[in-house]
Amino acid sequence: MSPKRQAGILPSNADESGSMRRHGPTFRHETTGIKGKVHRRGLAWVERWVHAMQSPAGPCLVLVFLAVTGFWSYKSIQEGIEQLVEEGLATYLENNSADIDLMIDMRRRALEYFSSVPVLILEAQGLADEAADGDMDARALRDSGRAVKIRSILHPLRQGLDIHAFWIVDRSGRILTAEADEDIGRQLSAKGTEILEPAFAGEPVRQLPIARHRLLKDADESVLFPVTFGARSLGAGEGSADVVLLLIYDPRLIFERMFRSASGESDWDGFAFDETGMLISGTIHLPELKAVGLVPDEPDARAPLRVQLRDPGGDLTQGFRNETPKAAWPLTRMAASALAGESGVDLEGYRNFLGLEVLGAWTWLPEYRIGLAVEFRSSRALRLARPLLMAFGGMFALIVLITLSVMGLSYAMKVMRQRMEADQLGQYTLLSKIGEGGMGKVYKARHSMLLRDTAVKILSTESIDAQSISRFEREVQVTSQLNNPHTIEVYDYGHDEDTGVFYYAMEYLDGLTLADLLAEDGPQPAARVVHILKQACLSLAEAHEVGLIHRDIKPLNIMICQRGGENDVIKVLDFGLVADVDPESDLRLTAAGVLTGTPLYIAPERVLNPAAVDARSDIYALGTVAYNLLTGKEIFEGHSSAELLDKVLRETPAPPSELLGQPIDEELERLVMACLEKDPENRPASMRAILATLDSIQSIPRWTQEQAGAWWTAYYARKGTPERDRKLPTS
């Protein structure tokens, strides 16, 4: 085995060059010891600086330095503050634009999914046929068995997707069923019918914000309730009426969340507007708009679809009145630029729709024909410089603090240097770093008494807060509860009081991840795949039976190695994303509704509802691993996570034999494809069920220790590993 690989793989996914392969958390593979020359030189430099500060001239030199650099900094920051504000505003709007792209994409996928549910299509067409053949009033439609079933299907599915309501409409423009009883049986207006025409022709419709009353015949026009929706045909059979599904959203909700950070400041206002300059979101200036008469002074009156971004010519909040008709007022400078298709930042100042002097930034999204803007009062720009004056007072206070702390710092550096020279954590001497991830670093270490090689994971100092410590403790506690020999074993957990470091020790594994195996050797023999899967199933079966779901099964988190004189021993790693199926459990520290894991290994039901986690999610991921091992390829290919997730939802992977271009045992192939079923109900019931099926396959010969040993011998030969470093069992 090569020196790099011997440095340890737990849970590194680095190749021989130190670069990373496949999907998953990023780890940097290093073999440089902690007691390196660079570290000692850096520490010595800091100590020399501390000793210099102990001399009488030290604080004086710092004072002069701070005075000179402080004056230069004041001028530089004064000149650069506008650039910082401009970049900050532009970044803020870019992020919001990205949020809208993501929201639109999620809504498109939700509509595609709902409109492809077979039972929904069948019931909707049946309801349309009943309504066309008989004289059904609104009450009859509401009480129809088909309508009740449709609502029972759609109502739970819309939970968590911000869907305000749904309608199912027939070609005559009649609402056959809906979320709200009062909408059932109503007739669309001519405008509503015109908007839906492409949907009946088979083209999906995405409607920009529009007043709800414009969609309905004989609606109350005094109620300005903005809605946006997507519409898609549910299909039309021979002799059946066409039906269209509408998923209706309240656009104010997305914009309210989007601009909440800006609106948290009393003089910041974030809002959205359409191609006529009409507000389609809320604004922090609603009280002022009501006070000056631009919005009716009524409890339920809101700004969307009532206020246009027009310049009144003066400050309306200070009594200015413009007697010309509002429609004749010019657009604000910002709105005029945005509606011309421009994006920009104006830090010189202009009047907003109340006539207040504001600074602002805006962007126009031509694909959606809406604009986003954020504005703040010009007076705020003066307050931005206030921290500079406070900073100068802080500089001189800092000199005093530095002088007082120099002795303590010198002593602390001496203690730290002595401790780090030993590279000691409790009973463990750290030898070299073998991996690094978001939560911490992994070192090869040796127990000082047992002289046993161990892997020690240390929580990063940058990550030390209450939540990260809890999640770190959860990872070690969960893993230590599991006793299966194919689960990574935890030896110890501790906290070094001198350095404040949290760490835990686990068995050190010399081997390859399955990702390494595939990169090294490509598709694996069916017998070896069965051998690997059985061991992984045993590990996960134990976890599932105590109520724990791994949630991140993938080739990078399964290792193949040699342990206890045996070849091809499988170890399941990284229970850092584990979830407890008990909703009351303290282990559920991952935020609810957050999609975690690697796209190709995430089960379809988790894409639609990240909280839908049970053992069948791990079964899907293990099926994907089995597919990788048999074919040497991923189940899907794509250029982005969004594209991969879309394929996970919509596409069925090609059978392994078809992708590989050669026969694969039929029973094994059926099992793998069953694990990859979109519907969790169609997958094997448990890991034990998968084990039973694997044991029942008689057509695949058993993978022997002799075969495994021959593979490892050939592997070591390819890598040029010296005989003394090989881990082959002796016969």
Image: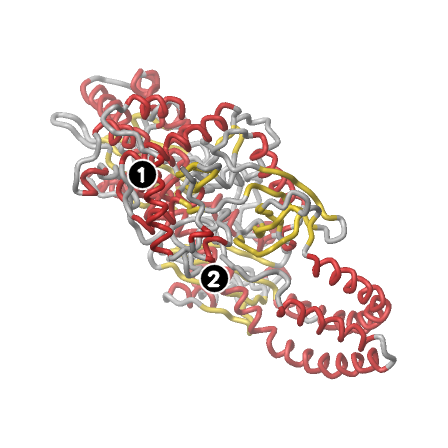
The C terminus appears in which quarter of the rendering? Answer: top left
- Residues 201 and 616: in front is 616
Mark 1 or mark 2: which comes first in sequence?
2
Q: In which quarter of the image is residue 668?
A: top left
Q: Is mark 2 on a helix, strand or loop?
A: loop
Left-right relation of 614 to 198: right
Where does the image place residue 675, in percent across and percent down from the top left? 32, 30
- The percent position of residue 245, horizontal first and vertical second, equals 29, 34
Location of residue 708 by image quarter: top left
Circles 1, 2 touching at the beta carbon (< 8 Å): no
Count of marks overlaid on the render: 2
Pick the front one: 436 or 134? 436
Instruction: Give the residue at mark 1.
Output: 707
Q: Can residue 303 be seen in this view?
A: no
Quickly name the residue at label 2: 310
* SS at mark 1 in the image: helix
Whether 167 is drawn above or below 409: the answer is: above
390 left or right, relative to 175: right
Residue projecting furthest to the front: 731
- Residue under the image location 59 percent in, 47 percent down: 457
Q: Residue at x 44, y 59 (%)?
A: 18
Label 1 amino acid? Answer: Gln
In percent of width and height, residue 282 lies at 52, 49
Type of amino acid at the residue the image marks with label 2 = Arg
Position above or below: 675 against 340 = above
Residue drawn at x 49%, y 40% as measured from the top left: 573
**Height in image: 581 above or below 437?**
above
- Residue sitting nearer the eye, 52 or 16: 16
